């Protein structure tokens, strides 16, 4: 991206606003419990627009990525936060540990499952796998946080790890959070266990039997194994 940042972002705003659809915006806003404004650009259309935009103007330069993403995060319409995450996706291989403060900001700001889960399983998960030396410091800070979205991230960051999952860490994080009555924590626990059950079903089943998980967490954890008829009677 050789354009000045202001010009680059102005071009993105102009493109998105030209495709705004107020009739679609209202139900999209309602689906997210009226927490965010929407332009009314649905996901398939947004992907087309961003592909066009990147073809015309390129991706943000790595040294400008932090500023571009933070600016988009400040804009009211939720589609701009999705655009910011797309830029992070496209530049994932260039990300280094110095991006952690940015990811922390995105997790705790305008927080909801639609952005946090993507950040957790893609950006945080891939970065901590690529740079294992920083993993414990990051997770140790976030697991102690009062912010539920940071704690949800610690539970979900290993979603795509499969056989590389640190089982001890996963189970430890779940034990710390299993008494939490927050829906998004209970759901994250179930989701993380369900994904890991595809790799280590016996370990997950034993864990579920031993721990005092919330009903929601337990139900979600066993869903895949039940669908494969690998367990009965739960």
Image: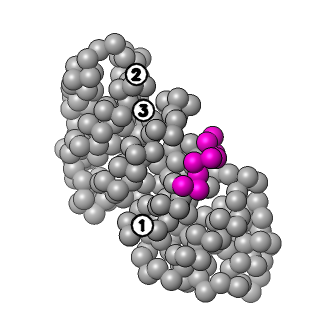
Task: For residue 187, say whether it is visible.
Answer: yes
Q: Residue 203 occupies which quadrant of the picture? A: bottom right
Residue 36 — which label?
none
For mark 1, give the secondary structure: loop
Query: Dot 1 corresponds to which residue?
Result: 145
Query: Dot 3 corresponds to which residue?
Result: 87
Crowding at label 2, few (<14), some or many (≥20) Cα neighbours within 10 Å? some
In the image: residue 202, left or right of residue 186: right
- 223 versus 159 height, above or below: below
Closest to the camera, between mark 3 and mark 1, is: 1
Q: Which residues are magenta?
A: 129-137
In the image: residue 128, left or right of residue 11: right
Residue in view at x 64 percent, y 51 percent: 160
Task: For residue 79, say whether it is visible.
Answer: no
Crowding at label 3, few (<14), some or many (≥20) Cα neighbours within 10 Å? some
- 224 versus 162 height, above or below: below
Q: Position of residue 68 (x, y in %)?
A: 31, 31
Q: Earlier in the sequence, mark 3 or mark 1?
A: 3
């Amino acid at each position: 991206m050789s354009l000045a940042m202001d010009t680059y972002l102005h071009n993105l705003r102009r493109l998105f606003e030209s495709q705004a659809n107020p009739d679609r915006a209202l139900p999209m806003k309602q689906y997210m419990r009226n927490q965010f404004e929407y332009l009314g650009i649905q996901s398939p259309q947004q992907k087309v627009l961003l592909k066009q935009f990147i073809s015309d103007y390129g991706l943000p330069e790595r040294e400008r990525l932090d500023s571009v993403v933070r600016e988009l995060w400040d804009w009211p319409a939720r589609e701009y936060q999705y655009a910011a995450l797309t830029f992070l996706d496209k530049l994932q291989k260039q990300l280094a540990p110095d991006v952690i403060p940015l990811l922390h900001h995105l997790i705790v700001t305008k927080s909801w499952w639609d952005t946090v889960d993507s950040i957790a399983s893609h950006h945080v998960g891939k970065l901590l796998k690529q740079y294992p030396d920083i993993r414990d410091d990051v997770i140790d800070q976030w697991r102690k946080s009062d912010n539920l979205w940071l704690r949800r991230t610690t539970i979900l960051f290993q979603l795509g790890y499969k056989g590389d999952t640190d089982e001890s860490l996963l189970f430890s994080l779940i034990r710390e959070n299993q008494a939490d009555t927050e829906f998004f924590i209970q759901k994250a626990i179930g989701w993380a266990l369900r994904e890991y059950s595809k790799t280590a079903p016996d370990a997950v089943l034993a864990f579920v039997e031993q721990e005092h998980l919330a009903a929601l967490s337990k139900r979600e954890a066993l869903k895949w194994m039940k669908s494969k008829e690998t367990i009965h009677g739960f």
